[in-house]
Image (cartoon, grey):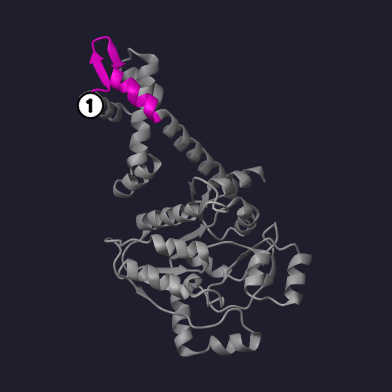
Amino acid sequence: MKELIEIQEKLFPDLLDIMQRRYKVLQYIQLMQPIGRRSLADNIKLTERIVRSEIDFLNKHGFITVTSKGMQVTLEGDFMIEKLSSFMDQISEFRVLETQIKDKLQLKHVIIVAGNSDNQATVKQDLGKACVQYLSSILTSDQTIAVTGGTTMAEVANQMTPLAHAKNCMFVPARGGLGEQVENQANTICAQMAKKVNGNYRMLYVPDPLSEETYYSIIEEPTIKEILELIHDAKIVIHGIGDAMTMAKRRKASEQILTKLQRNQAVSEAFGFYLDEQGHVVHKARTVGMQLEDLDQAEYVIAVAGGSSKAKAIQSYFKQGKSNILITDEAAAKQLLKG
């Protein structure tokens, strides 16, 4: 049923809210029947206009009967409540969990999908779908979207679908390549996203990380300068959050840097910045592209990361207060609340 709801929600974004409201009305009538419309409105904190609309719908479809004594649930209504109860409990639990994480990390918006992406491959797909769905709700024409690399971002690109209301959007890589698999590099991911939404994209052909001398030489190149301006002006940023030591090894960091990260207890990595549990920067890899301070200019900074093993990294990164949206999974969320 959950998969069906997800499909329906893409077509009708308000579907879950409507379902929850009608279920709430139906359930309250069942508990208090017979009950009048005004009394119902007062008790479930909805306006009489909305209650009247929902009563008309439920009555028309045979879920309730309306008499001079008040409203009562029919057998069909009882059956619907029974069938929906477990699903609604799950939805309510997730909404509570999302609110708790939102409050804990002081975020604008939180989306949680079921499962643990550490050991369930389909959960990472769900993270990608959730990101695309949220992106479709905020994206408008002629916007610039900066995207980082990684396996989670690659899954977001895999799940991307055409967006009729978002024309001429520009997708740019938030930073240079990692020297890893091509399909997980930011250049590849932003190109794939752009093609799927019939948008435009630009590439950033620079290695990552760089020496100081090479860095200052490259950023003065006219073509690199032009792309960096696009990246810094992006109003939407989509990025992953990495485990510090895992990312350092993927970037083939020297033994000196690995020792430094271990000594300073680095926990998370994003945009080349390695952070400890309190969100303090303990090391910065010299990279061309978006920096943490650039995120202040973006309107939506969407972090996508899941798995119980990522909970510490997620919490560490959000201590910086640079991103305002988190898309994660149930396992990471519950681990976050445990602290």
Q: Report the side of 94 relative to 29 (left or right).
A: right
Residue 72: x and y, percent? 30, 15
Looking at this rendering, what residue extends furthest in the right direction?
263
Q: In the picture, which quadrant includes the N terminus?
A: top left
Q: How many marks?
A: 1
Q: Name the residue that disc number 1 marks.
A: 61
Q: Is residue 68 magenta?
A: yes
How many residues crowd around disc 1 within 10 Å: few (fewer than 14), some, or many (20 or more)? Answer: few
x 31%, y 45%: residue: 8
Magenta range is 62-84
From this view, report whether residue 20 is shown above or below residue 309.
above
Give the percent coordinates (x, y) of residue 272: 61, 71
Q: Is residue 246 left or right of residue 162?
A: right
- Residue located at (68% from left, 75% from top): 253
Measured as percent of width and height from the top left, residue 265 is found at 75, 62
Residue at left offset 30%, top offset 46%:
12
Q: Amino acid at mark 1?
A: His
Q: Secondary structure at mark 1?
A: loop
Whether residue 154 is situated above or below residue 72 in the rendered picture: below
Outermost residue, left side: 60
Of the pair 213 and 79, the residue shown nearer to us: 79
* Picture quadrant where residue 14 is located: top left
Is residue 41 at all visible to an observer of this figure? no
Residue lying at 54% horizontally and 57% vertically, measured from the top left:
305
Q: Percent position (x, y) of residue 275? A: 67, 63
Examine the rendering and report whether any part of residue 322 can be seen: yes
